[in-house]
Image (cartoon, helix red, strand yellow):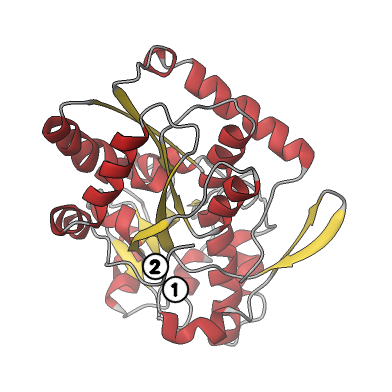
Amino acid sequence: MPKEDNPGPMSRRILLFVALAFVAATPRALSASPKTLRIAYAGSMGAVMDRALGPQFARSANIAYQGIGAGAYGLAHLISSGRLQADLFISITPGPIRVLQRAGLITHALPIARTQMVIAYSPKSRFARELGAAARGSEAWWRVLEMPGLRFGRTDPTTDPQGQSILFTMQLAATYYRRPDLAQRILGSARNPAQIFTEASLLSRLESGEIDASSGYESAVRSLHLPFIALPPQIDLGDPAYAHRYARATIHTTVHGKRETIHPQPLVFYAAVLKNAADPSAARAFVAFLRSPRGQAILHRFGYQSPLGPPI
């Protein structure tokens, strides 16, 4: 099992403060009653959770729904520290689930969907023609992303699995295309401040044209009907048949003063009922809904694929 990434103490304190401020600024977050199902979910799921799954379940179960979307690692640390209360946690990759298992707040998590990495782009971008050519396969996507002036966006690898995944993808691409400097030319440093945005705002910035292209999960990108460049399965982290190839990518990080090396984790979404849930029966019912034919049909309509792998 690959090790999960954990942000350092300073990064975690900053993350907790920012995320807590966001939650505290939302009146509903402070007024939830036991009859409100509170779900903390990976921010990339915003469209499917808040436009479809959450409201449909709420109507059928006669219960109020409140969704809290943000980077999965950030949410996991907020929950484990007691600064955020939720009934259900939905993560992408096993790493954030492990944080809550170590905290004794989760016993197991069930896979509910999967996705893969893509490069999303804005139709409003001044590079839209070149990016569209890359999507059709008539231009090398990595050459387009290296063009001077192109604004690329991604999430923070210390707080969000997607931020880690694009680093892994670019490492794999450098080998696949035999371009050793590919990742450096496109991304710069691992935490390049000019490129890093919150997961919840990344694709909205892309929609508005504030950035030209970004990393993305195909599920989230399809949910927002954004154009994207599909990547080869050898580098998109979505095909278990290439798991041995994916494992060659690494990120070096320091956790509690100890140097660690982490590898890609499968891009599978997991749902887990929290032990301190205010309404555990509603949370369990929502997980069953996610795994039901009806729930899976909704997920598929929003660009998600059927889950793979056992519970964790």
The answer to whether residue 210 of the structure is visible from this angle is no
Residue plotted at (41% across, 34% down): 87
Circle 2 sits on which residue?
116
Quadrant of the rendered image containing residue 283:
top left
Say whether marks 1 and 2 touch (CB < 8 Å): yes
**Image-based side of 133 in relation to 101, left or right:** left
Quadrant of the rendered image containing residue 116:
bottom left
Give the class, few, some or many, for how many residues have Cα within 10 Å of label 1's Cα (few <14, many ≥20). Answer: many
* Above/below status of 136 relative to 20: below
* Above/below status of 36 relative to 43: above
Please, which residue is most extreme toward the right here?
A: 257
Q: SS of the residue at dot 1?
A: loop
Identify residue type, mark 1: Asp
Circle 1 sits on which residue?
236
The answer to whether residue 39 of the structure is visible from this angle is yes
| Mark toward the start of the polypeptide (1 vs 2) | 2
